[in-house]
Amino acid sequence: MRTTLKKSLGEAAAFIDDSHGEPRLLKVLKSLAKAGENLNAEQATIATAVIGRMVVAEPTSLANLWTHIGTTGTSGSTTVQARINGAGQGDGVTTTNAESDGTAKGEVFDPPLELEPGDLVEIEVTAAPGSGAQLTAALRLQPVTLEK
């Protein structure tokens, strides 16, 4: 069962200490809500391929995709995309060869994409540069949605 952390906890007097700008209980609950799981993948020489995959065991949501590229390459771009059950999600994260080596970028799914047990989640490189290297990518799974 997916859970949503409600703002209305304050109305139920769930917060006692508000001396630091935000109630301490809310800070703790938000930290716990963000303590999800990552699907991490690495690729030494950047090439088009599925570089990471997992089957979802419990209901959760896909919150974001992050990439870091050690060497951005000599031509073209690197595009990394999240896939759920074979379908690409969002726009993906694109880094051009003109960007600095060590570039880190992300894509946030707002609202997070809902996942059910048995869903196949993948990280796919859909475009690769010439001479690009040291790609690290991570998908952030978050079992609790924070109400805004």
Image (cartoon, grey):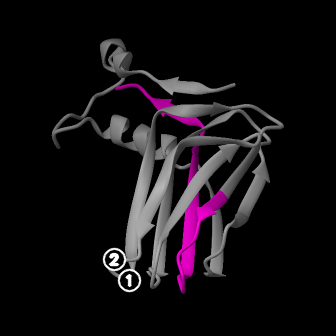
What residue appears at the point 22 percent right and 37 percent down from the top-left corner? 22
Could you tell me which secondary element the residue under label 1 belongs to? loop
Look at the image and say whether residue 132 sits in the magenta stretch. Answer: yes
Q: Residue furthest right?
A: 118
Q: Position of residue 9 (x, y in %)?
A: 38, 19
The correct choice, above or below, for 136 with respect to 90 in the image is: below
Residue drawn at the location 71% of the way across and 53% of the way down: 122
Q: Quadrant of residue 85?
A: top right
Magenta stretch: includes residue 66: no
Magenta segment, prevailing SS (helix, strand or loop): strand
Mark 2 residue crowding within 10 angstroms, few (<14) / some (14–19) / many (20+): few
Q: Amino acid at mark 1?
A: Asp
Residue lying at 41% horizontally and 40% vertically, measured from the top left:
30
Specify start and end residues of the magenta stretch as a single range. Answer: 124-148
For residue 117, above or below residue 103: above
Pick the quarter of the image with the C terminus.
Answer: top left
Residue linked to disc 2: 98
Is 7 in front, or is 118? Answer: 118
User: What amino acid type should be assigned to the residue bearing mark 2?
Assistant: Ala
- Circles 2, 1 touching at the beta carbon (< 8 Å): no
Foreground mark, 2 or 1, reads: 2
Q: Position of residue 46 (x, y in %)?
A: 61, 77
Name the side, left or right, on which 24 lies relative to 94: left
Q: Nearer the viewer, residue 72 or 4?
A: 72
User: Which quadrant is the N terminus positioned in?
Assistant: top right
Check disc 1 and report the residue beneath it: 101
